[in-house]
């Protein structure tokens, strides 16, 4: 989704009823700064940043939960972006909190977030934070639990750390490059299924319809998962065996979950089988597929070679 239009002026801060909670999280951003440079070994970078990233992601999830109403409309104020998609004061509060906290962790890092006006300055940075404060805002607004906070740290265009926090489900997915993927601290892995027939598939209906037709096999359709990052995280833990993504997804929807899927033994690629490239001038992607490594090749073959 596009960034919030700034033509109408700044988005107001949280109302008085939530200001105490918001200020609590904002004050917590004054923790000691971790000054880390790329000359330091990457494993050391991971060890240094992981605990602070976990704390930030959990605090961000708790901040969003203060506005969430399961089964009911959110208490947060609501606006509409320039292309008609929603944004709430919860999105903006989480974005402000994370920008403050993560920028203090790595002052040298660039920044790309769904809810912050983009700047080409990030393109010159070797280290970049990629953030979706609330992925699945429509679900969040309507009281559906399938939303998440997604955070990735890129080094030279590739995710080094990734977190997808789904606080309404109490599930915290995380990965570090070369270190495997976990949910709530326990290791996870993709499904080892190697056949399309009967596979559990999640994605937008038109793309799922096209995939089933091209594959020529019956699949098991799962209910829509509004948060794209959460959809891919469920591929990583094997609950979803094939995750499909329509065109127009952005870096912030994908980067953290991409790493989690990869570290769980799967792949996320475009329909030509190419791995995703992040932190480009235009952070938009085409149609994508995610699955375990063996099944993934069959998905790509079905999507590209059959009519």
Image (spheres, grey):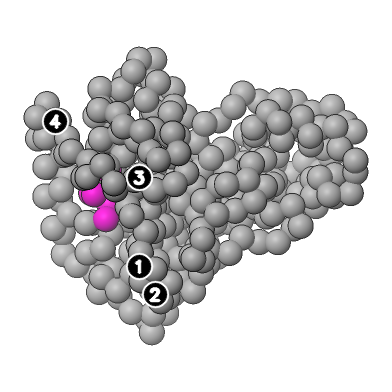
Q: Answer few, some or many: residues within 10 Å of disc 4's Cα (few below 14, many 20 plus, some between 14 and 19).
A: few
In the image, what residue occupies the spot 64% across and 51% down? Answer: 286
Residue 17 belongs to magenta span = no
> Quick check: can you spot residue 127?
no
Judge by depth and name the residue closer to the eye, 37 or 206: 206
Position above or below: 123 against 56: below
Indicate the quadrant where residue 20 lies.
top left
Q: Which residue is mark 4?
A: 15
Where disc 1 sits, the SS reads strand
Which mark lies nearer to you, 1 or 3?
Answer: 3
Indicate the quadrant where residue 149 lies.
top left
Label whose residue precedes the other's in the sequence (3 or 2):
3
Query: Separation of disc 1 and disc 4 at Cα?
Result: 30 Å
In the image, what residue occupies the spot 11% across and 35% down? Answer: 19
Indicate the quadrant where residue 101 lies.
bottom left
Q: Which residue is mark 1?
A: 110
Query: Separation of disc 1 and disc 2 at Cα?
Result: 6 Å
Mark 1 touches mark 3? (CB < 8 Å): no
Residue most extreme to the front: 7
Judge by depth and name the residue closer to the eye, 26 or 198: 26
Q: Which residue is mark 2?
A: 125
Magenta extent: 94-99
Mark 1 touches mark 2? (CB < 8 Å): yes
Where disc 4 sits, the SS reads loop
In the image, what residue occupies the spot 39% across and 68% down? Answer: 120
Position above or below: 193 against 284: above
Q: Kindly identify which numbered label has been placed on residue 4.
A: 3
């Amino acid at each position: 989704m596009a960034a919030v239009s700034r033509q109408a002026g700044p988005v107001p801060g949280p109302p008085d009823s939530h200001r105490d909670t918001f200020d609590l999280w904002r004050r917590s951003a004054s923790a000691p700064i971790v000054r880390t440079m790329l000359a330091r070994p990457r494993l050391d970078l991971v060890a240094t940043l992981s605990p602070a990233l976990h704390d930030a992601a959990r605090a961000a999830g708790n901040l969003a939960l203060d506005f969430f109403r399961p089964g009911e409309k959110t208490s947060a104020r609501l606006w509409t972006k320039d292309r008609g998609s929603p944004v709430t004061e919860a999105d903006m509060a989480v974005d402000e909190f994370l920008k403050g906290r993560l920028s203090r962790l790595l002052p040298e890092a660039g920044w790309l977030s769904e809810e912050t006006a983009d700047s080409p300055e990030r393109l010159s940075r070797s280290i970049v934070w990629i953030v979706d404060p609330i992925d699945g805002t429509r679900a969040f607004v309507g009281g559906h639990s399938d939303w998440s906070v997604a955070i990735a740290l890129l080094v030279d265009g590739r995710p080094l750390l990734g977190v997808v926090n789904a606080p309404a489900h109490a599930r915290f997915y995380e990965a570090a490059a070369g270190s495997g993927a976990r949910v709530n601290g326990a290791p996870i892995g993709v499904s080892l299924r190697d056949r399309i027939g009967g596979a559990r598939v999640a994605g937008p209906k038109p793309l799922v319809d096209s995939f089933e037709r091209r594959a020529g096999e019956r699949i098991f359709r799962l209910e829509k998962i509004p948060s794209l990052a959460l959809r891919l995280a469920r591929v990583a833990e094997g609950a979803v065996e094939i995750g499909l993504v329509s065109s127009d997804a952005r870096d912030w929807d994908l980067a953290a979950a991409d790493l989690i899927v990869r570290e769980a033994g799967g792949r996320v690629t475009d329909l030509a089988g190419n791995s995703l490239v992040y932190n480009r001038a235009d952070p938009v992607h085409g149609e994508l597929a995610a699955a375990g490594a063996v099944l993934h090749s069959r998905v790509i073959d079905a999507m590209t070679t059959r009519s």
